[in-house]
Image: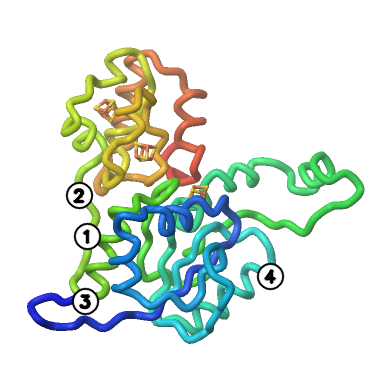
Amino acid sequence: MQYLGIQPKRPKIAVFDFTGCEGCELQLANKEETLVDFLAAVEVVAFREVMTDAGDDYEIALIEGAISRADEEALLRQIRDRAGVVVALGTCACYGGVNRLKNTFDLGEANREVYGDKPKETSEVRAVGDVVEVDLAIPGCPVNKAEVERIVQHVVLDVAFSFPAYPVCVECKQRFNICLVDRGQLCLGPIVQAGCDAPCPTGGRGCWGCRGPARDANVPEYLSALKEKGFGEDEVRERLGFFGAFEGAVG
Ligand code: SF4
Ligand code: SF4
Ligand code: SF4
């Protein structure tokens, strides 16, 4: 791949999975129409989901999943020491994701309920950035492959990348959708970071906020607007807490 006749450097990347469903990794692997270009732009040295070789000479580490065990924390610290750039890939890595719901239960009780007399080692779920320094966080459950590809282009060409400064509503309107809130359905679009191209409202389901808060989102104001429209506090709180991305946004 050349740009202005220059052959950019192919960074060595490694992909690691922690507590998550591996759906973000699947996004990297399954978009076949751009996979060849993607692999031409980077050199993949480790990616357990798609290859057996696993090298430890990498510059960029993509981290999928949250951290919920002591061995995960130790491995993550080791990766941070080796990699020049650490990327949190997906909502689990950026915020804890749906795993974070576990933190609302007593861990001992939950362990007994699920595993009976064979409890598993488990600890509070943390985002990657709660454990080590993160250079770039790409939210999404799963991540949007087109956005990841744009970010890779920027990294390879050493050009700064910025996420959209607007919320999901803008992309929703670009897709000519009629607003679901006006139809009585809860949607977090006005306070959520864009970049996903609004697949949920386009498919008739309100946004659950997997990409986290939009820049300068006025969360309290939107919550009071939802209240005025008759949405219940419990429903709104459940929605905001689902991905762990709005912790602290409501009391
Ligand atoms: S962010 Fe979503 S798709 Fe990605 S690993 Fe977590 S649960 Fe799976
Ligand atoms: S459906 Fe949701 S994302 Fe779309 S315009 Fe309405 S509030 Fe915004
Ligand atoms: S519309 Fe909302 S829930 Fe759906 S992918 Fe985008 S940010 Fe995530």
Q: Residues within 10 Å of mark 4 (few under 14, many from 20)?
A: few
Residue depicted at x 54% and y 70%:
51
Q: Quadrant of the N terminus?
A: bottom left
- From the image, state whether disc 3 or disc 1 is nearer to you: 3
Q: Are marks 4 and 1 in contact (CB under 8 Å)?
A: no
Q: CA distance from mark 3 to mark 4?
A: 33 Å
* Marks 2 and 3, the one that precedes in the sequence: 3
Question: Element at badge 2?
Answer: loop
Give the labeled residue for mark 1. 162
Q: Residues within 10 Å of mark 2 (few under 14, many from 20)?
A: few
* Marks 3 and 4, the one that precedes in the sequence: 4
Give the number of the disc on residue 71: 4
* Marks 4 and 1, the one that precedes in the sequence: 4
Q: Are marks 1 and 2 in contact (CB under 8 Å)?
A: yes
Q: CA distance from mark 3 to mark 1?
A: 13 Å
Quadrant in the picture for residue 137 = bottom left
- Tag 3: amino acid: Asp
Give the number of the disc on residue 165: 2
Q: CA distance from mark 2 to mark 4?
A: 37 Å
Q: CA distance from mark 2 to mark 3?
A: 21 Å
Give the labeled residue for mark 3. 158
In this image, 160 relative to 5: left or right?
right
- Tag 1: amino acid: Ser
- From the image, state whether disc 3 or disc 4 is nearer to you: 3
Quarter of the image where ligand 3 sits: top left
Give the number of the disc on residue 83: none
Question: Element at badge 1?
Answer: loop
Give the camera-side residue of 100 and 228.
Answer: 100
